[in-house]
Amino acid sequence: MGYVNGLKCRECGREYPVDPIYVCEFCFGPLEVVYDYKKIKKVLTRKSIEKREENLWRYKELLPIDGEPQVGLQSGFTPLIRADNLAKELGVRELFVKDDTVVHPTLSFKDRVVAVALTKAKEFGFDTVACASTGNLAHSVAAHGAKAGFRRFVFIPATLEASKIVASLVYEPYVVAVDGNYDEVNRLCSEVANKYRWAFVNINIRPFYAEGSKTQGFEIIEQLGWRAPDNVVVPCASGSLLTKIWKSFKEFKEIGIIKELQTKAFAAQATGCSPIATAIKQGTDMIRPVKPDTIAKSLAIGNPADGYYALHVVNESGGYGEHVSDAEVIEGIKLLARTEGIFAETAGGVTLACAKKLIETGRIHKDETTVICITGNGLKTQEALAGQTLSPHYIKPNLAAFEEVLNIIGH
Amino acid sequence: MAVKVRIPTPLQRLTQGKEEVEGVPGTVIDLIQDLDKRFPGIGERISEGGKIRRFVNIYVNEEDIRFLKAEGTSVKDGDEVSIVPAIAGGRN
């Protein structure tokens, strides 16, 4: 049996049973999973975790399932890379990259949340899963859903780039390309979700789905040798990931896996869509929605659902919010690739560039341990780098031509 | 001619099933307080302590009031006010 007591509204505290519901009937606040930590504390220890397989389900008691894991049995437990080259470049003592560019099977942290969402969808008895997405989430629902034997519907804006559509289509879900922008797709999906009994991972399964993000935080603590970092820098779209990483740290403290928690959480956004970082900088808890304009499309949520909670995590932990221009995003992607050999998507460029700025402005101290969360693979958004990289050296197939190149580069 | 107020499905139980009701001109928060007199209970579902609840979005003539003057946004006869519960959805 599982360790979940039920669902609870984050706003007004009303309680609900475990059902595919996501919003409080009374005040429209989001519902959150509530666990029995006393019971979990008895079974989940450093030792019991270390004996388990290296995937995200090694923390299964802190995930909202009743039975055994059914989806994503190879997902998670991505490398925590000690980034000494990058640390030297940025002038800090100890820096780590949590590398979710290599999550199985679709190379973004969405494979974590979808693994949990689809396991829950099986438990609820759904045969169809669905999502509204512009990229990473669509790929993950299509892929995990194929393996798990679900009928799949993926709703996207019709104007999406061809490469992103192919990366969903290859798994043969029903791809519904809607004549409208993302917000309109989302609105349509909420109507579809009301009418058809499907598991929409980011709508009616959202309270369970979002919990999957905690596994990134659990892994960070375990991979640091069972300690929490001094600083963690997290990209923000809806703000859910940052909120859940913080929750994971608190849960490990709650059940006694770590004794101390003094981590400062930092929110990273692109200047063209920075409602959370801007509110933090202005010292208000009023998140003003914006109309997004940035190359970091996977972070472009102008009206972030969990923005308020992300902001409170940042303030509670003593962290800060930062945002960077599109040019800095590109530089961030290139810096990470050049120093650590990791090719991140634009969201990764945002996170890295924000971390750099936070170090330069003294918000992150140079003698502390910092973890930077990189959440998706750069191979998916290559068009963002068009004309921004070095060029190849074009030559004739002879040695003299090659040696001329060596001359040019000053070998 | 009054202010037209569009009621979302979850709140139509309080408006006897009506999708659209009439409201009084003034500020948005005045309008909600007036609605609550005629449809008791609707006020606390949408607002708390004179503030719109965090997960309720209000639009005046299709513009989110957070882009205007929030609760203090004024509405006049002929304006359209929509009450829309925020949808918790991720973009990525």
Image (cartoon, grey):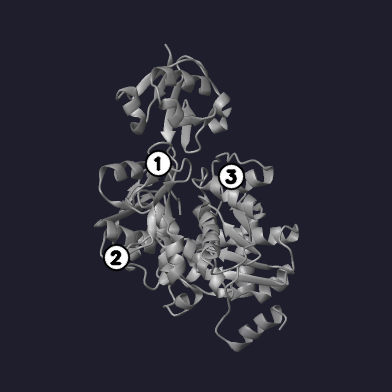
Mark 3 Cα within 10 Å, few/some/many (few <14, many 20+)? Answer: many
What label does residue A275 carry, if any? 3
Please name the amino acid that badge 1 sits on. Answer: Cys
Q: Residue at x 46, y 19 (%)?
A: B79
Rendered location of residue A163, percent (x, y): 42, 61
As drawn, the residue found furthest toward the bottom would be A399
Where, quadrant-wise, is the C terminus of chain A in this rendering?
Answer: bottom right
Task: Mark 1 and mark 3 in contact? Answer it, CB < 8 Å.
Answer: no
| A209 lies left or right of A252 | left
Rendered location of residue A53, percent (x, y): 41, 78
- Residue A16 lies, with reference to residue A79, above or below; the image says above
Q: Chain of mark 3?
A: A
Please name the amino acid that badge 3 sits on. Answer: Pro
What label does residue A24 carry, if any? 1
| A48 lies left or right of A402 | left
Q: Nearer the viewer, residue B19 or A300?
A: B19
Mark 2 Cα within 10 Å, few/some/many (few <14, many 20+)? Answer: some
As drawn, the residue found furthest toward the top would be B1
- Residue A29 lies, with reference to residue A59, above or below; the image says above
Secondary structure beneath dot 2 equals helix
Mark found first going from the N terminus, 1 or 3: 1
Q: Residue at x 46, y 54 (%)?
A: B92
Residue placed under numbered mark 2 in the picture:
A146
Mark found first going from the N terminus, 1 or 2: 1
